[in-house]
Image (cartoon, grey):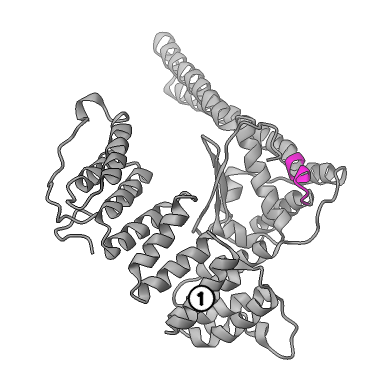
Amino acid sequence: SHAHEGGQKFTFFVVKDPDINAFALPGGFIGINAGLFTATRSESELAGVLAHEIAHVTQRHIARSIQAAGRGNLASAAAVLATILIGATTGMPSDAIIGGVAAAQSLAIQQQINFTRSNESEADRVGIGILAAADFDPSGMPSFFWTMQQRAGSGRQIPELLRTHPVTTERIAETRDRAAQLPAGKGTDSLGYSLIRERLRVSLLPSDTNFRDLYRDAVSADVPSSDDHRYGRALALVAAGAPQEAVPILRDLVARRQDATQYHAALGQTLLLAGDVPGSLRVLENAQALFPRNVPVTIRLAETLMTAGRARDAHHLLLDLFNNVAPSPAQARYIAMVASTAGDTVDAYYYMSEFHLMGGELALAIDQLKLALTVPEMTDLQRNRIEARITELEEYLPKGKRSREVPDSSPRRDPEGGASKPG
């Protein structure tokens, strides 16, 4: 919200990848690998990376890079062609021709490198201003750059981030100088940042990890521990297949911080894994009352309701959520499954259509909607909704592919195109 381009829409997402990397894509999409999240030591460092990527978008670096690459390729191709033609007409030695071609290509590569360095410098300058305006510590940006440079010099594998965002001593010095001239901002991390960092840390570990040894000091009576490490210890015990041992830790954390949705969701999920379905329902229904339409809490409650055999209640709960908060692809697929189990075949087809649409499979999305029209118990309201959605989506199909026939119009096909009726 503090970027100068007020009209630019941003979409942020996390990739479950242990490599340290972040990137900006056309259209304001900014991705961050989970490995980068866990490599940061403060929320301001994480915010510094995001501010840098935001600046790449607002300064139109992606579009400018594509234009520059096109011009560079044309110039390089022209130079190569000229070298070959001159060599052919003047009898130039073959070694000289090869050298001329190599020089032309090297010039194009160097121009692209220079353009990239210019972009990085501008993204640092603009990004650190966005970082300070958002009340984060601007020194978080050079601090993370320094961490990446240390990793590169330690002999460990060079992070992917450094391949796309080269860090130099000069770059670190420049951002430090700029940070020193800006307000310091908040110096403490939010609880949400600390908890999600530990959750990602545990989730990225391979399945053969000895999870019981993780965070062992976090529950030691002799060693002071932070709540985020105790939370990490509980998650590690769950990963180790011992949810019963994690329950007391999470109950204590919930009692200490009623406002932390992560604790409620984790406790409800852990109780379910421990086989205490009534206990999980009590925790999550209380959390739902405290945090209406919170996505993690609502999803966990729906999972528990499904285990309790209350598919219809889970379906209504998720409908209320996703009619107000757009679902992710995984969530659209999940509500389709819940709707199918609850006996609402039309909704099952509808959400499978949305799932395919999010994956760019437009024809499959329309097929799911057409299958929904074959369900006998469809209401007039549902039919109108489905037909309107088909008309809307078919506008994006090539003209010759509109009004495609459904592969099998039998009402007994499920939302995945299988042979049996949903549910």
Residue 194 vertical position relative to residue 377 in the rendered view, above or below? below
Asked whether residue 364 is drawn in magenta, I would say no
Q: Residue furthest top?
A: 89
Of 217 and 381, which appears nearest the observer? Answer: 381
Decide if residue 397 is in sight here. Answer: yes
Residue 164 vertical position relative to residue 335 in the rendered view, above or below? above
Image quadrant in which you'd find residue 128: top right
Q: Residue furthest front?
A: 380
Query: Residue 272, image x and y in percent?
Result: 44, 79
Look at the numbered disc 1 and give the secondary structure of its residue: helix
Query: Residue 145, image x and y in percent?
Result: 71, 51
Quarter of the image containing the N terminus? Answer: top right
Query: Residue 140, image x and y in percent?
Result: 75, 52
The residue stretch that appears in magenta:
129-136
Give the dominant element type of the magenta stretch: helix, strand or loop. Answer: helix
Query: Residue 155, image x and y in percent?
Result: 62, 61
Asked whether residue 134 is drawn in magenta, I would say yes
Residue type beneath disc 1: Gly
Residue 275 vertical position relative to residue 416 in the rendered view, above or below? below
Left or right side of 396 for 82: right
Left or right side of 169 for 345: left
Q: Residues within 10 Å of mark 1 (few under 14, many from 20)?
A: many
Q: Residue at x 81, y 46 (%)?
A: 176
Decide if residue 239 is in sight here. Answer: no
Kindly identify which residue carries mark 1: 268
